[in-house]
Amino acid sequence: EALKVNGVLTSLNLSDNALCGVKFGRGSYDASGIQALAEALKVNGVLKTLTLHSNNIGDEGAKAIGGALAVNGVLTKLVLVDSNIGDDGAAALASALRVNEVLTSLDVSNNNEIGSTGATAIADALKGNAVLTKLKLDDLCHLDLPKLRGTDPVESINLSGKALGPASAIVIASLIAGNGVLKTLNLRENHISDAGAAAI
């Protein structure tokens, strides 16, 4: 409720607070807390950074946050690390990315349930989103989206040894498809697997 009226708070970290009633696999899932937070985000006009690391918000929570992102005009950084988000939640965030015009950094790393379907939804959304510059799907590496798109043109990108998984590879493949300047891409020693290799 405070976020609906507060006019000065620009950064909020609610990491590891069992916002949905579950912590370390114990408790009963209840989305009412994250849904209330999402409703506040729809009207808040000052918060720029929101960190919700390790709260097990799940797909239902991600859908609520996605709904807020679709109308929020100020939040620039969102951290949803280790939040038990899967393909449905990723798709909801992707839908928000299609219309959001301010978010520049999104971290959804360590959400191992995001598979090819969720990654493809995000990749498709990024085709029409030129605002997001940093996307983190795996623990060790933010993807530099302007360089991968070619809007910040470079001829070589080294992403070796970054523990990138299939989801990152799917997004990378989608972005470099329209890149007219990149000549060398190093993806050695990662974990892109067959799905990632097929996308590349």
Image: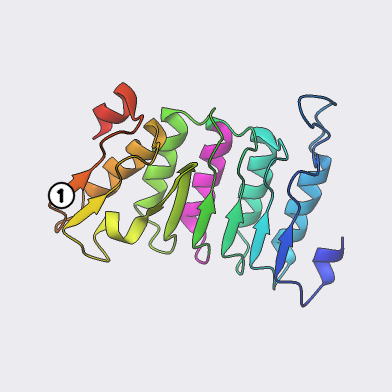
Q: Is residue 36 left or right of residue 133?
A: right
Amino acid type for the residue under numbered disc 1? Thr
The residue under the point 77% across, 53% down is: 37
Q: Is residue 128 above or below residue 64?
A: below
Quadrant where the image shows the N terminus? bottom right
Q: Is residue 131 left or right of residue 90?
A: left
The residue under the point 64% across, 68% down is: 48
Residue 169 lies in magenta, yes or no?
no
**Picture coordinates of residue 27 (x, y %)?**
85, 26
The residue under the point 60% across, 68% down is: 73
Q: How is the image coloured?
A: rainbow
Crowd band around label 1 with a 10 angstrom C-alpha radius: few (<14), some (14–19), many (20+)? few
**Picture coordinates of residue 62 (x, y %)?**
64, 41
Q: Residue furthest bottom?
A: 8
Magenta span of residues: 88-102
Of residue 7 and residue 109, the one placed in the foreground of this image is 109
Of residue 89 and residue 153, the one placed in the foreground of this image is 153
**Picture coordinates of residue 101 (x, y %)?**
49, 65
Q: Is residue 89 left or right of residue 132?
A: right
Q: Is residue 196 left or right of residue 13?
A: left
Q: Quadrant of residue 113?
A: top right
Of residue 174 and residue 168, the one placed in the foreground of this image is 168
Q: Quadrant of residue 44?
A: bottom right
Residue bearing the label numbered 1: 184
**Picture coordinates of residue 40 (x, y %)?**
77, 59
